[in-house]
Amino acid sequence: MALQKSLQKIRTPWVERISRELASGEGVRAGFVEQLVRFYELLEQTVVTGDAGWLDPILYDWGRAPTETNLEEGDYFVSFVMNRMIALTIEVARETLGKADALELIAAVIPVFSHSLSVVVRYEMETRVAHTASELTKIQEKLQQLDHNKSNFISVAAHELKTPLTLIEGYTSMMADVVEGSSQPEINNLLEGVNNGIHRLRYIIDDMIDVSLIDNNLLTLNYQPLLITHLLNLLKTELAGAIVERSQTLNINKFEGSEIMIYGDSKRLYQALLNVAQNAIKYTPDHGMITVTGRMLPGFIEILVVDTGIGISPENQSAIFDKFGQLGRSDLHSSGKTKFKGGGPGLGLPIARGIIEAHGGTIWVESEGYDEVKLKGSTFHILLPTRTEATDPLITKFFGHYDQKKMETETEISVQETPPINNPSS
């Protein structure tokens, strides 16, 4: 009974003290006083009955009450209010009650306040987590929309550029026919420079189209039987000029699995391997070494492209597979697919990843880090599933009992149908 009287005695000064300190402005204070009165009534019920559940409804309301501004600025407003309420309750009890009554009241209400604070903190944290999750969802949706818009732009730009480029190529060819045998050799040199620029631009446009196909899941694979070793032999022939120009060494080793017949799109896989190998040449200084080897794994063939180049820092080892991902300052890069640190749109490795993943494989890189002095090098890992039968019934029908010698010839011809990729200087 004495405890109830003590609670009733400090009620008015308690409400006044807390509302004066924690609420600014008459309008705010009026609404806050109503909340304090409600809380105090429930506090009395809790102290009398010993049941903390009386306070749960108002604590739930308070815990869910933080405004958008509080959440965005990281303010824990309700927790702060509850902590101050505890301190002010002790002050008001000491000022209003005798020592014994004050101690009795404080001993009774502090456990209730502590429980209330833990409940409010939990509700407030749940509200903050829900807000953060909502904001992350909005950001993710914006990023997805941005990436979608970028993919659309790439697709439209690539196709729009292709038509005028074809016209330029045609008129350049006609001009070359007109000046053929001319006594002005400098004109032929100029036209050759224009052709180099046209070829370089065509490769970029084709890469943009490939990226667009990969982004929109429109990349079509023409599955056929193939041998990895034939792709690697063609790769060695294709890169011979660049290797000589850069005074590098290219070692292509036979390995277990390279002579096994698998099914895949030979043109696309060759394109992926070429992109990875050209990247290795590009970031390996002159007189360096590039080694292509591999091994057989359960269900997969692993191809390794190892270089003695400048390496890649750990934080950039995933970024290099993002489209338009470039490391370092692009204005300091030279041009060309295989020139040292040569520039470019940054599409080669993303295309390689898209092609390999479309085959059910994966690609990643390992490197001890970036160092142009110690030349720690990089190792690209390419995993391809050892698919030994076609998934398409038509492929099975035509290639199910394919002659081995004929298959080897077809694989080589299929890749060679793709025009050789030159390295025109800009």
Image: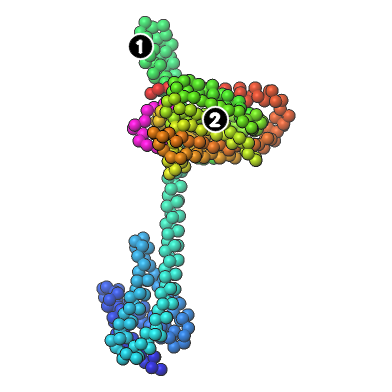
Q: Which residue is mark 1?
A: 186
Residue lying at the far front of the rendered structure: 374
Which residue is at 39% across, 19% downward? 194
Earlier in the chain: of badge 2 and badge 1, it is 1
Q: Quadrant of residue 265?
A: top right
| Horizontal and vertical percent position of residue 213 | 52, 36
Magenta stretch, overall SS: loop
**Magenta-span inclusion, residue 329:** yes
For the N terminus, the quadrant is bottom left
Q: Nearer the viewer, residue 148 or 44?
A: 44
| Horizontal and vertical percent position of residue 138 | 43, 54
| Horizontal and vertical percent position of residue 57 | 45, 77
Q: Which residue is mark 2?
A: 292
Q: Secondary structure at mark 1?
A: helix
| Horizontal and vertical percent position of residue 112 | 42, 80
The magenta region covers 326-339
Which residue is at 52% across, 32% downward? 305
Residue lying at the far right of the rendered structure: 401
Which residue is at 71% across, 27% downward? 402
Asked if the residues shown at circle 2 and circle 1 are in contact, with their CB atoms under 8 angstroms apart, the answer is no
Q: Quadrant of residue 13?
A: bottom left
Q: Quadrant of residue 282?
A: top left
Q: Dot 1, crowdedness within 10 Å: few (<14), some or many (≥20)?
A: few
Residue type for callout 2: Val
Image disc number at residue 246 = none
Which residue is at 42% across, 83% downward? 42
**Magenta-span inclusion, residue 220:** no
Q: How many marks?
A: 2
Residue type for callout 1: Glu
In the rendered structure, the answer to whether residue 201 lies left or right of residue 96 reads right
Q: Is residue 42 visible?
A: yes
